[in-house]
Amino acid sequence: MGASAGAAAESDDAALLVRLREGDDAAFGELYRRHAPVVRRFALSVQRQGVDVDDVVAEVFLRVLRAVRAGRGPRDTIRTYLFTVVRRVVAEWSAARRYQLVGADELTERGPRQGDHQVVQAEGELLARAFLRLPERWREVLWRTEVEGHRPASLAAQLGLTPNATAVLAHRARRRLREAYHQAAELPLGRGA
């Protein structure tokens, strides 16, 4: 890529970052499409044993999205920022794995087993059932904080609450979701919801 093409790409990235800061989710998708292949190749070059490259790439983009939405993160050149986050994620995850002691009996439990996808699917169904049992306001605050990554204080005005009340609502919703999940787990899969 020539110098003028590189400058144009950086200019486009800066414009996409501005749009993302303004809440345009399509801008994030474009940044992802533009940079994910390069980030993946870079992650492969710094990869450590036991750290999945695709998980690293997903985590990197999630962290960047959260940073930008919180008013931090890159302003113009995103690629250097992405590479820095890759190094940080790989280092953090490698360090975390290094300190996990695994006994021989745990090794067989952690290894892939036939039917694991069925367990994951069943867990997902239980979680969905529990989530749908919550009042709409609790579902909204959980979705906005846990899935979209918003801080309760940033949602307060939209919910018509104080920042403190929003944090309490989010805490109660998480606790109730845990309880609803355990209740859903006690029912046969065909019933409830």
Image (cartoon, rainbow, N blue to C red):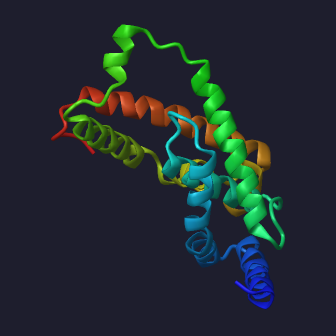
Which of these two is toward me, 174 or 116? 116
Q: Is residue 160 visible?
A: no
Task: Give percent across and percent down for residue 15.
Answer: 76, 82
187 vs 103, left or right, is left
Task: Give percent across and percent down for residue 146.
Answer: 58, 47
Up-down: is 106 above or below 192? Answer: above
Task: Give percent across and percent down for residue 26.
Answer: 59, 78
92 vs 115, left or right, is right
Q: How many badges with numbers are in the image?
A: 0
129 vs 91, left or right, is left
Q: On the rendered image, what quadrant is the N terminus found in?
A: bottom right
| Residue visible at 69% across and 37% down in the picture | 91
| Residue visible at 36% across and 23% down in the picture | 110
Up-down: is 158 above or below 58? Answer: below
Up-down: is 90 above or below 107? Answer: below
152 vs 36, left or right, is right
Task: Give percent across and percent down for residue 75.
Answer: 84, 70
Q: Is residue 89 visible?
A: yes
| Residue visible at 77% across and 51% down in the picture | 153
